[in-house]
Image (cartoon, grey):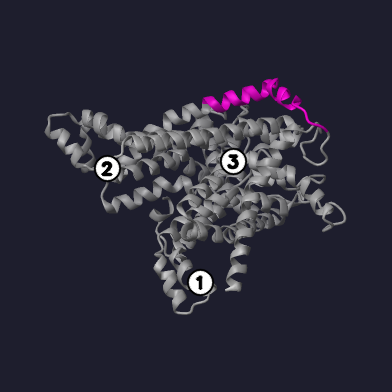
Amino acid sequence: MRDLYARFGGGLATIFLSLVLIWLAAMVLAPNLMMIDYALRPNLPPAQIGSEADTWSLDNFTYLANEAVHRAIFFKTIWASALVAALTLVVCYPIAFWMAQRATPGQLSIALMLVIIPFFINEVLRTLAWFIILAYRGPLNAVLQGIGLIDAPIRWQGDGGVLAGMVYAYILFMLLPIYNAIESLDRSQLEAARDLGSPTWRTHWRVVIPHAKAGIATGCVFTFMLAAGSYVAPALLGSPGSRWFTEIIYNWFFEGGDWNRGAAYALTLLVLCLAVVLVTLRLFRVNLTDVAK
Amino acid sequence: MTADRIFRGLFVLYLLAFVIYLFAPLMIMSVAAFNTSRFPTVIPWQGTTMEWFSAMWADAAMWRALWTSAIVAVLVVVVALPVGTAAALVLTTLHSRARSVAYAVMVSPLLTPGVVIGISTLILWRQVGVGGGIALIVVAQTTFIICYVMLMVMARLQRFDRTQEEAALGLGASRVMVFRRVLLPFLRPALLASGGLAILQSVENYNTTLFVRGFETPLTVFIATKVRTGLTPAVNALALVIIAATIIGAIAWEIARRRQVTARPRS
C-alpha cells in the first residue's frame, strides 16, 4: 500500500485504489453476499418481508436435497461436465502435443490461427451451427444414412447433442493451456526417453503428461466450470429430457418466480464449481497464479 | 519403421479430421444461408438464393439487438479498461503476502460461472430498485471482463523497466506526468488488445446477460430466441456476416501487429 503511494503519488494512487475497491466491494463481494442472504431467506410476499417469518434457514437447500428431479439433474450436470472436460482433453492432447513439439514454426502459426478463428465467433452461433448439423432432417443424419451406417434418422437432440456442442465450444480453453505447458518441455528429454527404449505411450505417460500437468489441470478446471455454468448449449441442443442445472435456476427466476430458491440453487452451483477448482488444483499441486495466465 | 509410418499417417488423418471438425459446423451454417429451404440446412438443396440476406437486412428487431449490443460493448470498455489497469497496477505494486490474497479475490470472477454473476448482480441491484436493463448488463459483464483486462495489463507490466520511471522523476517530471508520458504509452498495446478482447467478450456473452437483460434484447439473446421461436436462414445470413467480419478483423489485427513489430525493430 505504501509502495503504491510512493510510486504514483497521492492523487493517482487514491484513484487506483478506489477504482479497485469499488469493483471488489460493489461488483464482486456485495452481490455474492446478497445472494447468500437471499438463499437463506424464504420467499415471502412484499408485505411480510422483514416480519417474523423472514428469518434465516436452510430450507431452500433442503428443498433441493429432497426434490428428486432437481437433485438428479444437479448430479447429472456434475458428471456430464466432467465428461465434457475428459472428452475435450482426449481430443485436444494429441493436437497440443503436435503443436508444441512437432510442428514447424510455419505449421504452428497456421495451426494457432485455425484454432483461434472459430473461437472469435460467439458461443451462441457455434451452438447454432451444431443445432443445424444435429437436426432430425439435418446433414449428419443424411450423411450417416447415405453411407448406410444407420437406417433411420437419429434424434441427436438431448444429452448427446449437448455433449457434442460443449466439447466443440470449449476446445480452445483446453488446447491452449496444454500447448503452453508442453511447449516448455525440452525436446532432448523426449529423445532421451526414446534412446532408453521407452515406447511412445510410456514417454507420454511418464515424461510429457507429468510435465504438462499444470496445463492439463487448468484446461480441465476451465472446461468443467464453463460446462457446468453453461446455459446456451443445453437450451439449444437439449431436449426436455436432458435439462441442465442452469435451466432449473433460470426457471426459478423467470418462471417459478421464487428468487430465493433460485439464489440457493445458484449458490450450490457456485460452491460446487469452486470446490472442483480448488480440489483439482490441490491434486495437481498447481498454484492459482499459474491458472490465470 | 513401418509401424512408425502407419502411426504418422494415422496422426495426419487425425489432424485433418480435427480441422474438419473445427470448420465444418461453421461452413454448414454459412452455406445454409444460401439455401431456399425455410429451415436452415444444406441437405436437401432446394435452390440458391440471396433472399435471406435481404430478410435479415430488413429485420428491424435485428438492428435493435445489434444497437443494444454495441452500446453495451462501448460502455463495458469504458468501465473495464481503467478499472482493470488500476487493478493490475495495484496488484503488481503490492507485497507478496497481501498479493496472493488480493490476487485470489481479483481472479475469482473468472472462476465463477457466468449465470451466477448474472444472478448475484440482479439480486443486489433489486435491493436498490434497479431492474434488468442496459445498465445492469454493463455492470454484470464488467465484473468479469475487468479480470481479463487486468491479466493482460499485468503480463505487459512484467516487462516494464521501473528505472524509466525513476529517470523521468529524476529529470523533474511529476508523478502524474510519469504515469501519462512513460507508463501509459508503454501499456498502449496491452490496452488496445484488452479493449478488443473486452468488446468480443461483451458482444458474445450470453450466460450472464440472460439474467440481467430485463426487457432488452442484445444480439446473442436475439439469436438464441430465434432458434427457439422460429429459425429461418436469415439468422444464418447474420451468422455469415459475423463470421466474415471476425475473420477480416482477426487478419487485420494480425497484419497491424506484424507491422508494429517490424516498424520498431529495436524495442
Please give the residue where the numbered disc 2 appears in the rendered image: B160
Q: Which mark is residue B207?
A: 3
SS category of the residue bearing label 3: loop
Question: Is the residue at mark 1 from the same chain as the one at mark 2?
Answer: no
**Near-viewer residue (A142 or A262):** A142
Mark 3 residue type: Asn
Q: Earlier in the sequence, mark 2 or mark 3?
A: 2
Q: Looking at the magenta stretch, what is its main secondary structure?
A: helix
The subunit letter for the residue under badge 2 reads B
Q: Residue at x 48, y 79 (%)?
A: A197
Disc 1 on helix, strand or loop?
helix
Q: Is residue A98 left or right of residue A77?
A: left
Query: How far is disc 1 from disc 3 in space, using C-alphas?
Result: 37 Å
Q: CA distance from mark 2 to mark 3?
A: 36 Å
Amino acid type, label 1: Trp
Task: For mark 3, name the chain.
Answer: B
The residue nearer to you, when weighing A213 against B109, is: A213
Residue B4, given in percent of the width and then of the height, sits at: 58, 71
Per the image, the residue denoted by label 1 is: A205
Which residue is at a point 55% across and 61% down the rendered structure image?
A94
Outermost residue on the right side: it is A151
From the viewer's perspective, tell me whether residue A273 is left or right of residue A291: right
In depth, the one of B158 and A193 nearer the eye is A193
The magenta span reads: B47-71
Mark 1 near mark 3, Cβ–Cβ under 8 Å? no
Where residue B81 sits, quadrant-wise, is: top left
